[in-house]
Image (cartoon, rainbow, N blue to C red):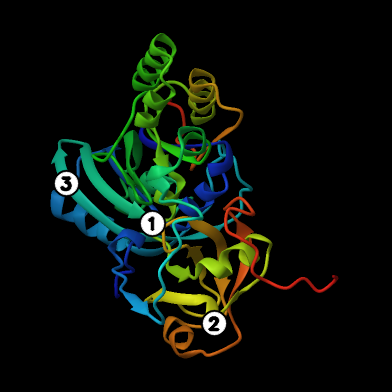
Amino acid sequence: MTGVLPIASEDATKAIQALLLSGKEYVCVMRLHHTQPRDRVEAVLGEFQGTIFQRPPVRSSVKRRLRERTIYYLNLLEMKERNVLFKVGCQSGTYIRKLCFDVGEVLGCGAHMQELRRTRAGPFVEDEGLTTLYDLLYYASRRQETGNEEIIREVFQPMEKALELLPKIYVRDSAVSAICHGAYAAAPGVLSVETGIEKKDGVVIFTQKGEAVAFARALASSEQILSMGHGFVAETVRVLMDRDIYPRMWKSGNT
Amino acid sequence: MQRTKAPWEIKRELLTKAKEKTSAQYGCKPEERPTADYVRLGIINLDKTAGPSSHEVTAWAKRILGLAHAGHGGTLEASL
């Protein structure tokens, strides 16, 4: 199986968790065990859009209990004899091998996954900065030959890229350090907020310069946050930024 | 049944609550980080080939680039 596999280095590994909330997209060749009319295959694939139940396959790396997963879209692209090419957008943790098997069951003819390529992992797509292992080798050896460290920047994107699809709350410079030390984000520190946030949603707190500060859980909706004069708007779940990049502006209780 | 939008299909707008200028003294845009920080806080959008497992590919990338740690976002099963 090939395709988009985002790899995070060192301190970016925390940010890559966001991809678990950001969905995946695949193109897949499914092989039917008997020929089927195209419109029937198309109809059955359509039925799998929405919420499905899946038990992870025997060879999997998670506990094998029945799980609910959302299929955002499932479109037939091409069909030739018993081979069916389709594109699927799905929640992270959906097993496509299992999906193919289940489609085969519903069709009654049986089916299996023949080939799979991941075309998207959250905000990471195939046609934007996709790098091969050969590219890594090339840039690493160029770095060594020239002694120019900067060459290696080519293969990386800032960790903030991984957070692109999560709703964001932007805060004042003066609020950053406190949040880096684990404080909740408070209403007076908020400068702007993205639409679509509901209470308890996962959000990311950002600086105005576009640096990720922390993962947080919203304590109010986008509209409420906008009108709040005081109180907490989000509870900090995981800090992403190094402490003390921004100055401490809060008063310490034990001086 | 109404289709659930994929995360990349959701459009968000920015609602402004207050305005303030950010100080140039602290922090910097992610793209402008010094190389050591840029690498330490960087992600590679890697095209995995068939054959090796996601874990193997991650270990190779780590070794090639001389990183202290590396982690991947979602296993892509090797090849059967």
Q: Quadrant of the C terminus of chain B?
A: top left
Q: Nearer the viewer, mark 3 or mark 2?
A: 2
What residue did someone put label 2 on?
A: A187
Amino acid type of the residue tagged 3 in the rendering:
Leu
Q: Nearer the viewer, mark 1 or mark 3?
A: 1
Mark 2 falls within which chain?
A
| Whole-number angstrom distance, CA of label 3 to CA of label 2 | 48 Å
Q: Nearer the viewer, residue B18 or A127?
A: B18
Identity of the residue drawn at 44% across and 55% down: A163
Q: Quadrant of the N terminus of chain B?
A: bottom left
- State whether residue A1 is above or below residue A118: above
What residue did someone put label 3 on?
A: A77
| Whole-number angstrom distance, CA of label 2 to CA of label 1 | 23 Å
Residue A101: x and y in percent read: 39, 44
Amino acid type of the residue tagged 2 in the rendering:
Ala
Amino acid type of the residue tagged 1 in the rendering:
Glu
